[in-house]
Image (cartoon, helix red, strand yellow):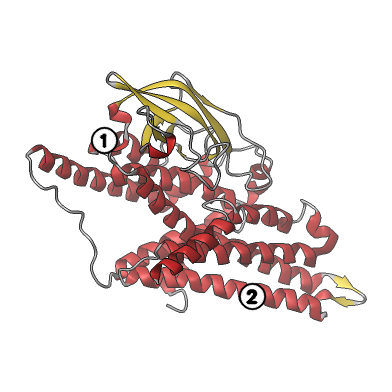
Amino acid sequence: MIEWDEMHLSMRDAVRKFVESEVKPKREALEREEILPYEILRKFFDAFGVADMNRTRGESDARRAKKREEAIARGEEPPARAKREGPDPQAGIELAMRMIPVIEFCKYAPGLLTALGVSAGLTPNAITSKGTSRQIERWAIPLLTLEKVGAWAITEPGSGSDAFGSMKSTARREGDEYVLNGSKTFITNGPYADTIVFICKLDEGNAPHERKVVSFILDRGMKGLEQSKPLRKMGQHSSPTGELFLEDVRVGRDRLIGETEETRAREGAKETFVSERTLVAAMALGIIEQCLKLSTEYARKRVQFGKPIGEFQLIQLKIAKMEVARMNVQNLIFRQIEMAAQGKSMDIAEASACKLYSAQATMEVALEAVQLFGGNGYMSEFHVEQLCRDAKVLQIYGGTDEIQISQIARTLLARG
């Protein structure tokens, strides 16, 4: 794939029209955190039929889980999940159609996509991939349709990049229940989440490094669960972020994902990171394209020393480097779409490389855009100021640049 086709462009134009009418006018209100992102996102879901499509997908996942449960109850080998073999053009189309809204939304409010990706992506996916049919029907489907807001809680105050090694949150068996304790921070949608996937370690009296990692589904308002007010961040103000505090929260086995302690939550988290890291390229492209658009427009009309600044070579160098970054990140997206159409996907090293380059390129472009605008670029009145602040988190969440470098290198060295 070397360019968007007519179907892609038609979808892009429709999404762009929605974003310019529903997001652009609210950009400042979102930035000042005067409004929440969820109603805008629900309106988008309704306008493009996403809620209905996601409901159908969730119902299909529930049926599949039900068949598995029935087979196990009969003492039979559960049916293996069907794997696509060989080329699958439809998968490429579906991925492209998911990427395009991400690109367009991120031109004005990247935080909206962060909030959406966690609420209707990471959180329900953690349930549909390992959960029971009842759990999918009760919790995942309302998340997939945005009827409920979701949060995926793994990061803790003392952990950061060492998410599992430093994890202190625990679940302890007590009769037929589990008692949960711990705290989480930097949780997207944390202040407003209706449903939370809480990842912790099973305390069986053994050493912390020997404990299983398990996941539970929590609801807002449960006794002992406290959700903080939104934290003030450097950027992505349209994505509410908060803390969670659990003190002796009692839950039944029905809230343990898969209703078993053998769901291998570590693997599920790894799959989540791959998905999150590849999506960063689409977010990056939206920010880069907008910075380039704003910079070229400004360079044409801004006059200094008697001529437009676009006639100065150093300004031309900035714009040229932005275009190179745009082409490279767009090609990474095209690669993902083409791989999906061939029935393939990026492994953890490729996903990390994709995120590393995309995040760094976006930050470089955003800083150059601010520099090109000069003093105006430092003022919040100008959009590039916001985009620069929003871009920085791409180098942090989903694994820092340093973690991506380590993951890439360790994977390559292990291959021999």
Question: Looking at the rendering, which quadrant does residue 259 occupy?
Answer: top left
Question: Looking at the rendering, which quadrant does residue 148 occupy?
Answer: top left
Q: x, y (%) of residue 181? A: 46, 25
Is the C terminus in the top left, top right, bottom left or bottom right quadrant?
A: bottom left
Residue depicted at x 49% and y 71%? 332
Q: How many marks?
A: 2
Q: x, y (%) of residue 387? A: 67, 56
Q: Is residue 302 visible?
A: yes
Is 255 situated above or below 291?
Answer: above
23 vs 342, nearest the viewer: 342
Number of the label disc, if any, that sits on residue 344: none
Q: Residues within 10 Å of mark 1 (few under 14, many from 20)?
A: some
Q: Which residue is mark 1?
A: 260
Verify CB contact (< 8 Å) between mark 1 and mark 2.
no
Q: Residues within 10 Å of mark 2 (few under 14, many from 20)?
A: some
Residue depicted at x 31% and y 36%? 257
Is 321 situated above or below 90?
Answer: below
Q: Which residue is mark 2?
A: 323
Which element carries disc 1, helix, strand or loop?
Answer: loop
Q: x, y (%) of residue 180? A: 42, 25
Task: Please indicate whether residue 149 sits to the left or right of residue 25 in the image.
Answer: left
211 vs 149, nearest the viewer: 211
Task: Please indicate whether residue 181 sits to the left or right of residue 365 in the image.
Answer: left
Amino acid identity at mark 1? Thr
Task: Please indicate whether residue 303 sits to the left or right of residue 11 in the image.
Answer: right
Amino acid identity at mark 2? Glu
